[in-house]
Image (cartoon, rainbow, N blue to C red):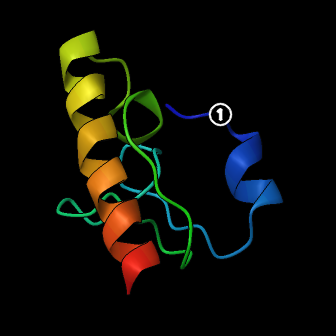
Amino acid sequence: MANPLIPSTTPGLQQSKNGGVSIDPVTGQTSLKSVFAGGDIVRGAATVILAMGDGRTASKGMHQFMMG
């Protein structure tokens, strides 16, 4: 489960069923326009390999977002 302070201090940030941050799986973008996430905050405790993959996905999504 994600840090319980995050949803209470971040209005508009949608959570998934497991209590993590909900994201678009293609871009890593959250319900907040310019916020991206991956790794444990999204999927819970997982491997470093999965977290690294999430980081790559989110970085591509951020690049696409910034470039329009």
Q: Of residues 32 and 16, which is closer to you in this image?
A: 32
Q: Name the residue beneath numbered marker 1.
A: 3
Q: Position of residue 61 (x, y in %)?
A: 31, 63
Q: Position of residue 15 (x, y in %)?
A: 48, 59
* Whether residue 47 is visible: no
Quarter of the image containing the C terminus?
A: bottom left
Residue at the far front: name it. 67
Horizontal placement of 66 versus 28: left or right? right
Determine the secondary structure under disc 1. Answer: loop
Horizontal placement of 7 versus 55: left or right? right
Figure quadrant of residue 18: top left
Figure quadrant of residue 43: top left
Q: Does residue 13 sit above or below 15 in this rendering?
A: below
Residue at point 33%, 57% (across, down): 28
Residue at the far right: name it. 9
Q: Does residue 34 sit above or below 49 in this rendering?
A: below
